[in-house]
Image (cartoon, rainbow, N blue to C red):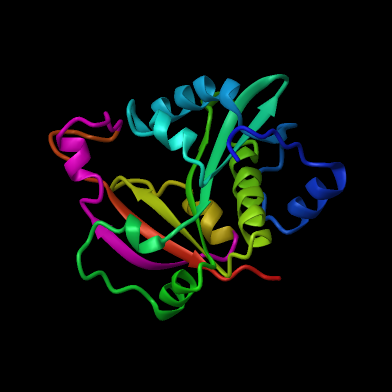
């Protein structure tokens, strides 16, 4: 799926946008494409600025289960979204975490979707790119049978990444995992831009049952 290119038709774009709450009043013109190998360098560049070098790996981009999309403006990648139909509990780092029954049921019936990452370049921030990428990824998962979609939101103690998108589009918080990235961050598997003397970040999990 990562190597096949896909462009939204005008009708598809209008339908997706009509279901999406876009908070910007000055939208940047974009095309949303299925990512392929030529987009990987740009995706890495955006990811390194937003999340730190090493956070997103080549393996993540080449994962056959990944649904990877890019937003392109004037020939340049200005954002990306990464989702998957996957087992949610495999992404948990907290032993014995209390997971809601509807999430467990969706996982047991292979009808759960995950939107793992949304990131936008500094030059395109605040122009509705992230909102539209998020909604496109959500729509793609829903079309593939996702009955519940879960999203991890990065909390660095001061800001909740994509918190505005989640609240605007009807997502509810159901689980917090402290020290979610601490092991990887402490071992320098990636360089977190929010790290000070120690890892202070946590993940807040959100969920939504998409409207049919």
Farthest-out residue, right: 11
Left or right of 120: which side holds 96?
left
Farthest-out residue, front: 64
Relative to 3, residue 81 above or below:
below
From the viewer's side, name the closer residue of 38 and 186.
Answer: 38
Image quarter in which the N terminus is found: top right
The residue lying at 86 percent from left, 48 percent from top is 11
Magenta-colored stretch includes residue 182 = yes
Relative to 176, residue 6 above or below:
above
The residue lying at 58 percent from left, 59 percent from top is 168
Residue 146, image x, y percentages: 58, 65
Residue 212, image x, y percentages: 71, 71
From the viewer's side, name the closer residue of 104 and 209.
Answer: 104
Relative to 34, residue 89 above or below:
below
**Magenta region, residue range:** 169-193
Q: Quadrant of residue 51?
A: top left
Left or right of 145: which side holds 101?
left
Query: Exactly how many numbered labels are in the figure?
Result: 0
Residue 109, image x, y percentages: 50, 73
Q: Quadrant of residue 58?
A: top left
Is residue 23 among what the camera can see? no
The residue lying at 22 percent from left, 61 percent from top is 94
Residue 63, image x, y percentages: 47, 39
Farthest-out residue, bottom: 101
Is residue 1 among what the camera can see? yes
Magenta-colored stretch includes residue 201 = no
From the viewer's side, name the closer residue of 108 and 132.
Answer: 108
The residue lying at 15 percent from left, 36 percent from top is 186
């Amino acid at each position: 799926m990562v190597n096949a290119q896909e462009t939204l038709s005008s009708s598809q774009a209008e339908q997706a946008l009509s279901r999406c709450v876009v908070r910007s009043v000055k939208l940047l013109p974009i095309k949303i494409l299925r990512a392929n190998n030529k987009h990987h360098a740009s995706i890495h560049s955006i990811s390194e600025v937003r999340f730190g070098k090493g956070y997103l790996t080549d393996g993540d981009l080449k994962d056959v289960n990944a649904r990877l999309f890019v937003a392109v403006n004037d020939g340049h990648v200005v954002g990306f979204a990464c989702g998957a139909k996957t087992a949610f509990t495999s992404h948990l780092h907290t032993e014995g975490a209390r997971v809601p029954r509807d999430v467990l049921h969706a996982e047991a019936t292979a009808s759960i979707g995950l939107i793992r990452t949304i990131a936008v370049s500094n030059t395109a921030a605040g122009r509705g790119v992230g909102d539209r990428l998020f909604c496109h990824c959500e729509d793609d998962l829903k079309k593939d049978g996702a009955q519940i979609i879960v999203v991890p939101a990065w909390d660095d103690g001061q800001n909740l990444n994509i918190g505005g998108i989640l609240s605007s589009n009807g997502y509810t918080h159901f689980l917090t995992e402290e020290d979610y990235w601490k092991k990887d961050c402490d071992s320098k598997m990636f360089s977190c831009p929010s790290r000070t003397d120690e890892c202070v970040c946590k993940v807040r999990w959100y969920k939504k049952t998409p409207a049919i």
